[in-house]
Amino acid sequence: MFTLACATWASAVAGESPEAFWREVAPADGWAAQEGGTQGGAAAPAARVFRVRDIAALRAALGDRDGAPRIVVLEGVIDATGGVPFADHADQSRRGQLRVPSRTTLVGRGGDAGLVNVNLVLKGVDDVILRNFAIQTPWDAFPVWDPEDGPHGHWNSEYDGITVDASRHVWIDRVLITDAPRTDDQNGHANGQEVQHHDGALDLKNGADFVTVSWSIFRLHDKNNLVGHSDSRESDAGHLRASFHHNLFDNIVQRAPRVRYGQVHLYSNLHVGSRTHAVYPHQYSHGVGVGASMISEANRFEIEGATTACDIVKTFGGTRYEDRGSLLNGRALTLDCPRLSGLGPAGWTPPYAYAPTPLDELAASLRAGAGPH
């Protein structure tokens, strides 16, 4: 089990009732507010507000697909196993993956709500809000060995913390996703390779669109955020529009995020880590993949051992990436290292109003306000 060290409700949202917080809609400062916006379950009548404390109640609250708005309130930490360990891969897939229907707000009450052994799946849905709870990234108990993966074979795991698959209008806000307490130094080795038990923290794929990720914490994880899952999926072009703002990336190895095809706006995020961390050594933050068009703006990168933008930005066949006023270890982030010479303007302008936080205030603002409260 994991514990949360967060502020109390009163200190986080003074003067606002929990019920008002549950019914908030996506604000205008990200892609989730475009083309009709994201309301989730804001219009749910009182009879459609479900307060849940165990996995059976959570399944029931998410279970019907009638399209009516609902608010599901998490109270405390809920473990998908219900105390019964997963028996095999099929059992983990059946009990560990929870589908979130359209027009749903899933929200934690207070600062101690969370999910363990859960992969939240948004598949083919519209209008979902996830707010104010923690997720311990699922530990795949039955990873698969692929001898043809790479020169020496590779272990492959399944199950993200959150998977947004072919879904539109999604607001993810004040969520904490972390491997802790089951971190990668507990992976073990087999067939001469480290066994992989964690997949992504939050992945967007298959034409997911109009997504905002805000005021959240990603902590102690390797392959963090994938936006677009395949170079060959050219139909993703024109979709995968996502905003990541006011998030804390705390000791993340890579993919914060790694993008294919999408128009992705990254502003007022704080990245902290070390190139020599014993378990989660920083490799890069922003990955520019095929078809990606990325705007980085007013972000802070506090990465021990990082010296140039080549330590922060990595290209995977993409060419459209620009940075506006970010800092690397207190100095201006400039894209003048040789490996980034092929990068050019993103070619678009965010279609919404937004206000980056002054860089000298960003760290304190995020450490006080990000994550569940």
Image (spheres, rainbow, N blue to C red):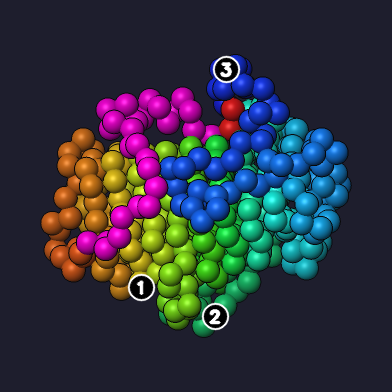
Q: Decide which of tag 1 and tag 2 comes sooner along the chain.
A: 2
At a point 58% along the width and 49% down the height, the residue shown is 38
Magenta-drawn segment: 345-371
Looking at the picture, does residue 332 appear above or below residue 263? Answer: above
What percent of the width, then of the height, locates residue 219? 49, 42
Question: What residue lies at 45% left-to-right and 60% top-to-bottom?
Answer: 241
Q: Disc 1 to disc 3, how far (Cα)?
A: 44 Å
Of all residues, the one furthest to the front in this rendering is 36
For mark 1, give the secondary structure: loop
Q: What residue type is labelled 1?
A: Val
Circle 1 sits on which residue? 290
Say what amino acid the circle numbered 2 marks.
Pro
Check disc 3 and report its element: helix, strand or loop.
Answer: loop
Determine the secondary structure under disc 2: loop
Q: Please determine whether, in this image, residue 244 is positioned above or below residue 75.
A: below
Image quadrant for the C terminus?
A: top right
Looking at the image, is 149 positioned above or below residue 99? below
The first of marks 2 and 3 along the sequence is 3
At x 17%, y 55%, the residue is: 335
